[in-house]
Image (tube, grey):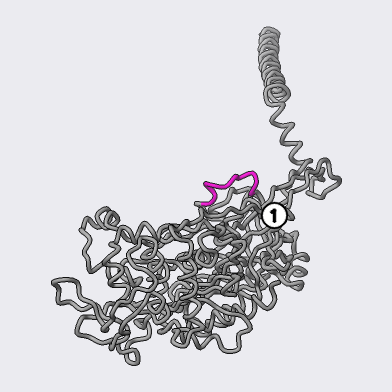
Amino acid sequence: MNTRFDLKSSLQENRLFLLRATTLIVFVLILFFALIARLTYLQIATHEKYVDLAQNNRVKLSVISPVRGLIFDTKGRVLAENNPTYSLELVPEQTPDLANTLERLSALLPISKDELALFEKRRKQQKRFASVSIRNRLNDQEVAIFSANRHLFPGVDIQARPLRHYPFPELTAHVVGYVGAINEQELKTIEPANYRGTRFIGKTGIERTYETELHGYVGYQQTENTAQGRSLKVLSYTPPLSGSDLTLNLDIELQKIAHDALGDYTGSVAAIDTRTGAVRALVSKPGFNANLFAKGIDQASYSQLQNSSKRPLFNRFLRGQYPPGSTLKPFLALAGLDYKTVHPHQRIFCPGFYQLPKQTHKYRDWKKTGHGMTTLHDSIVQSCDVYYYILAHELKIDRMHDFLQKFGFGQKTGIDILGERSGLLPSREWKKRTRNQVWYPGETLIAGIGQGFNLTTPLQLAHATALIANKGSTHIPSLVAKINDKPRQTSTTLPITLNNPQHWNTIIDAMYDVVNGARGTARKIREGAPYKIAGKTGTAQVFTIKQDEKYDEENVQEHLKDHALFIAFAPAREPQLAVAIVVENGGHGGSVAAPIARSIFDQYIQVTP
């Protein structure tokens, strides 16, 4: 009995052992084949992927941003430059706990809520692998503090970046413009590869218009690194191509004189070299500090600029549209001569008002008692309104439109800067198309003294003045003279041909006497001048005065006072410079705007050969 039992137990143990051994062998074989399958997958199927990962751990590709081109004035003075600055930057992809990192950074360095908000805005606009600025312009002490704690902040580092700086921030704010952070809309239009590592782009003025030339092209560098990220050696290097330097026709000394001559007034000045079309001064006042935008303007400062009643962000010389007032009279007189509606010696009686046939409404002259018998020459010198009511009635609005259009009114000058507006030169067709209304004879009379629907920019006025100074020929206004050392090509406008070329002299002689004649409306600015100026004053109404009302200059609110205008060129017989000046709510062109032109001419003609 016992022997049989022992034998049975021994057989059962052997079977159990074999079962367990077989199970273990099968399990080991399964693991072995799984390992073989995994190795096969890693070595063959995903070989390239892991080689790339290993390569990326070992080799780092860095983008090298190009240096933005500089901007100079016509005499080589720097208008836009790049100053080195330290920037605290973070790569979101390399930062495990972003919120905690920012909290600890704020405890280490002074980082404002506005800077954190701006960081969040930029972070959402960028890819996770892109470096995003937290704070710009760190001082040496702050750089040292962070460097000592660098190991505590993975994904955060200090980068040396060039920061755009404008030595004349208010003088050139509108013409040179400024750079600012790239926004979402701009990200859709720029070439992403060429803006990797670049945070700023031209926003306005020359900075925006010539963005492609100023920006340059990025470079790349491959470095071999240790597991800790330390660079061992450079494997390849493609240098960046720096942006082109621009030399402007602008003269910063003349710009400052024009700016200062405006005093406390709001307004604009445009000055063009009549011989070349080179723009020597473009002033829009008030301006603003362009450096605020270059370094990243805070919301409070931006709101203050945006909400100011004086609109410092508004570019007046390019986008300001004003009634030309009496500055339009020399052009309209030329139209009358060319269409043979009047002749130079014809005399027209001015009683102080004009009435259309069979109408009782009186269109008044600025001089209540009238100018008496007036010739074309006198009408320009003394700025007789009645003369131009009559002339406009004879010409009709469509002939006025067609002739004035030759001088560039109602259209852009073609200057090499973005944002120019065209002004408005009315006609029957324009009113029907835009307002679905007929044109009235009274509107023609108002257009004849540069009021009504007429609108022009200061730049447009300066360009038209240069056309008179050159007797029908001139260049398209240009701001950029050279790109690097290569002169920029400019072009001329189509010359204006008159039926009788002598009529140019008739108009120029009258404009000469506006300044130099005994009764000229700008005669006060001729005193002590070693050269002669030819010009025309203008006053543009801001609001309409009713038939039975009188304009009370002393009691009218400041923002409702007339605009003061003046167009001029000098020297009168051999012109070098044409200017147009608009002083908002300045009152009289002869007493307010004309002295500004004198200051500009004094500087330019004395220093220009």
Quick one: quadrant of the N terminus? top right
User: Which residue type carries mark 1?
Assistant: Pro
Quick one: quadrant of the C terminus? bottom right
Q: Is residue 252 magenta?
A: no
- Report whether 383 appears left or right of 434: right
Instruction: Report whether residue 342 is seen.
Output: yes
Query: In this view, which residue lies farthest toward the front?
Result: 345
Question: Which residue does the image show at 51% across and 74% down from the upper left?
Answer: 568
Percent of width and height locating residue 387: 32, 75
Question: Which residue does the image show at 66% across and 64% down from the upper left?
Answer: 164
Question: Which residue does the image show at 49% across and 58% down from the upper left?
Answer: 413
Report the front residue among 468 and 30.
Answer: 468
Report the front residue among 165 and 365.
Answer: 365
The main secondary structure of the magenta stretch is: helix
Q: Is residue 110 above or below residue 421?
A: below
Region of the chain picked out in magenta, as a range: 186-195
Task: Please identify the quarter of the rendering in which residue 531 is found.
Answer: bottom right
Percent of width and height locating residue 536: 46, 76
Check disc 1 and report its element: helix, strand or loop: strand
Report the front residue among 420 and 65.
Answer: 420
- Report whether 212 appears left or right of 593: right
